[in-house]
Image (cartoon, rainbow, N blue to C red):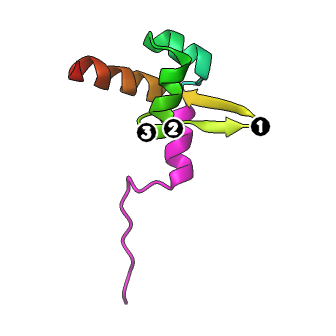
Amino acid sequence: PMTTQTQPDAKTPAERFGELLADGVFSVVDAAAFMGITRSEVYAMLDRGELASTKLGRRRLIPKRAAVAALARQLVAG
């Protein structure tokens, strides 16, 4: 009989996003303060796809892991 093998590490997008949110989220203002940049720069990073986010009502929330990763990329690049 033919069986379907699944990868043990295969996760749905919802599971991956849940992991990204596991450490909590920043508001745009808090992310800007954490990263040492302006709110406008955070919004520009969001527009360029350099920073993950989600919306809750009208609020834009940035996973802390995404902010840490973006900050690390900036430190390495610059």
Residue 34 x, y percent position in the rendering: 49, 11
Which SS class for mark 3? helix
Q: Which of 44 and 5 is in front in this view?
A: 44
Q: In which quarter of the image is the N terminus?
A: bottom left
Q: Marks 1 and 2, how far apart in space? A: 21 Å
Please state which amino acid type lies under the numbered disc 2: Glu
Which SS class for mark 2? helix
Q: Name the residue under label 3.
A: 48
Please state which amino acid type lies under the numbered disc 3: Arg
Q: Which mark is residue 68?
A: none
Q: Mark 1 points at which residue?
A: 57
Residue 10 x, y percent position in the rendering: 41, 57
Q: Nearer the viewer, residue 72 or 15?
A: 72
Which SS class for mark 1? loop
Q: Do the residues labelled 3 and 2 touch (CB within 8 Å)?
A: no
Residue range corresponding to the magenta coloring: 1-22
Q: Name the residue under label 2.
A: 19
Earlier in the chain: of badge 1 and badge 3, it is 3
